[in-house]
Image (cartoon, rainbow, N blue to C red):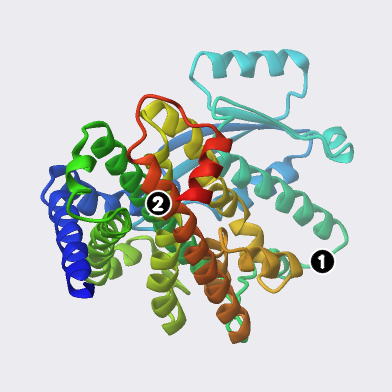
Amino acid sequence: MLDQRLRNLGLILKREYLERVRTKSFVIMTFLMPVMMFSFAFLPSLLIGRRAAGHRRLVVVTDNPQLAQSFRRQLQQFQPKAGETGMQYDVEISDKTTEAERTRLSSEISALSLDGFLWMTEEAVRAKKVTFNTRAASDFVELGIVQRAVRDGILEQRLAANNIPSAEVDDLLKRVDLDVIAIKGGAGVGMLLMAVMLVLLLYMSVLMNGIIVMRSVLEEKNSRVMEVMLSTVTAKELMAGKILGVGAVGLTQMLVWGLMTALFGGSALLAVGKMAEGMHFTPAMIIFFPIFYVLGYLLYSALSAALGAAVNSQEEAQQWQFFIVLPLMASMVLMMPVFSSPSSTLSVVLSLIPFCAPVLMYMRIVAQQPPAWQIALSIALLIATIYGAMVLCARIYRVGILMYGKRPTLPEIAKWIKYA
């Protein structure tokens, strides 16, 4: 009897697996997903880092020529070096601090003959209200450069006014690089990027494969294929085979993505320069990723299979699906606070909640590996929840797959669980 059940389970698993890996969508998503992940994680930084080459004409309006010269000198520090591409700033100085001059310069900006002007009079500096009129008000990188040049230029003038030698002034204004060294397994910016990519990959895979299970059950229920299949296999075997088959598809994708990362990940990280610093895989990250992926998938797939068996249409499924994925969505919202304070009471409690554990406990492991007992407790609670969910969902599945036409109510679903 056991051999027959295992054989039936294997046949259903094989059917679900082969039916999906042979589709064009599987091939496209398997090879397109890593490209999308890289684009979302690194492309914005690459575009910001590689600023367009060109020239910007700026005018500094001031009644203090030395202050304007200090601003120009500080701005030169942000110019691209030899062999680099970037934006060159041509700074002109005007001593006409009148409203007519302000109007004239604004007209030049409107006529596209001027990129911006800085109103930096002694009065504006004393009031700490220097204004910068520009066409590139949305260029936050340029605004940051101008703001720092203004701040350092004013500081340079004040230090010089106190008879501090210019060489000492230059030394005081030199940028100090801060090297962050993580102690006792702490994580830096590089590991944050790594954690976000891995958790996003886990979240997307668990969510997408759970939806695939739900839709598969719903499609076969509506096509009456279930009635034929149930003549030879039990409802439990059918549900288990579907969940394991789709899960095997997900693991296949993970394997392909892991191989692509090993082959091309190094060159991709080199392309983003300093962002690659501090990014590395630890043994815990490698070990626990498949563990939390499998456990999270089993939990949400069982819930999705029960939902697909209970409803009669895609519209009904979409209405209820939100409540199933809500804990996963909440986990994604909370992952940054958890990464910032992985040992706080809130992070510990959230990571022990079974519906949030696949994302938040793994985030804690990447940020700063928690005590072994917390990881073990999280996994134990997750396994217990999976077992309970499997029992409840199997009862819903057993009755729901043969119910057609009528939208089930919560009291009716409770009766299915009680009498199945």
| Residue 164 circle label | 1
Percent from the top left, x then y, of residue 410?
57, 36
Percent from the top left, x then y, of residue 178?
63, 72
Along the line of sight, the residue nearer the viewer: 63 or 194: 194
Along the line of sight, the residue nearer the viewer: 149 or 346: 346
Left or right placement of residue 319 versus residue 66 in this view: left
User: Which residue was labeled with disc 2?
Assistant: 204
What residue lies at 27% left-to-right and 43% top-to-bottom? Answer: 216
Please identify the quarter of the rendering in which residue 337 is found: bottom right
Along the line of sight, the residue nearer the viewer: 312 or 203: 312
Percent from the top left, x then y, of residue 352?
63, 68
Q: Amino acid at mark 1?
A: Ile
Up the image or down, 133 lies above or below 418; here it is above
What residue lies at 54% left-to-right and 32% top-to-bottom? Answer: 409
Left or right placement of residue 15 versus residue 238 in this view: left
Q: Is residue 358 visible?
A: yes
Along the line of sight, the residue nearer the viewer: 163 or 88: 88
